[in-house]
Amino acid sequence: MLLAIEQGNTNTMFAVHNGTEWIAQWRAATEASRTADEYAVWLSQLLAMAGLQMGVMDACIISSVVPQSIFNLRNLSRRYLQVEPLVIGENARLDIPVRIDKPSEAGADRLVNAIGAHVAYEGDLIVIDSGTATTFDIVAADGGFEGGIIAPGINLSMEALHNAAAKLPRVAIQKPQRVLGKDTVGAMQSGVFWGYIALIEGLIDRLKAEWGQPLTVVATGGVASLFHGTSLGIDHFDPDLTIRGLLEIHRRNKGLAQ
């Protein structure tokens, strides 16, 4: 079985694949100082609740945008699974062209998403990942990573608004029933939500105009579900994009058969 670990700036996901399908997924808050032993205690309890144990996993793949955490995640795999993990950006072969000026700067999460999108959708793609940051990346029909856009995430924008303005409260992000806010909370929710819809649709339009060829738009990430069914620019909402990419990278490196 494969343990896939996808670590973002806010959350870390652990998922187990049995060679045929994903059978378990869990999320924890990302804490850069968390040790391998702490991860093991937390993970072993969740595995037990799912009727699993550490010993059933014989492979591990790690994608992290938090460099200081990789040491402990690698030790989790070595110490408790007794396997050397594949780490995106280190020893994992991706087999895709990275067509940006400095390929080493491409984030692990963006490359994993590019692979996950390419194996599921045909043609040229825009991949939108909404998390701590909102990224827009173009993936060519041959799977090549062409570059993209990085914008602040919607939660980060709301938090910055609250922190910078003394009289503005911290509010939950949700879709307002109307654009025109009638109180402070409604005005803030409308500004952030509909402002992000405008950001998404505006950047999609500009990318399509610049690319000059048809582009299919795929959205993923924990916050993307907020926009599902609201933004006309998004063709597919795919919550499994990242773990599909991790599974494909594992197959390319280890020859795991479906």
Image (cartoon, rainbow, N blue to C red):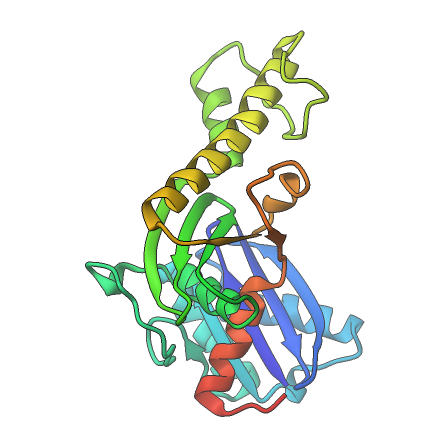
User: In the picture shown, does residue 221 fall above or below 232?
Assistant: below
Residue 176 location in percent, x, y? 69, 23
- Foreground residue among 170 and 230: 230
Task: Determine the residue located farthest toward the front in the rendered image.
Answer: 213
- Identify the residue shown where x is 44% and y is 75%: 74
Q: Quadrant of residue 110?
A: bottom left
Q: Is residue 65 visible?
A: no
User: In the picture shown, does residue 186 fall above or below 123?
Assistant: above
- Identify the residue shown where x is 59% and y is 50%: 235
Q: Quadrant of the N terminus?
A: bottom right
- Foreground residue among 212 and 229: 212
Task: Determine the residue located farthest toward the left in the rendered image.
Answer: 101
Residue 255 location in percent, x, y? 50, 92
Q: Quadrant of the C terminus?
A: bottom right
State left or right for residue 28 relative to residue 79: right
User: In the picture shown, does residue 101 fall above or below 224?
Assistant: below
- Identify the residue shown where x is 36% and y is 74%: 96
Q: Is residue 257 visible?
A: yes
Residue 164 location in percent, x, y? 43, 18
State left or right for residue 32 relative to residue 119: left
Q: How many marks?
A: 0
Residue 95 location in percent, x, y? 36, 79
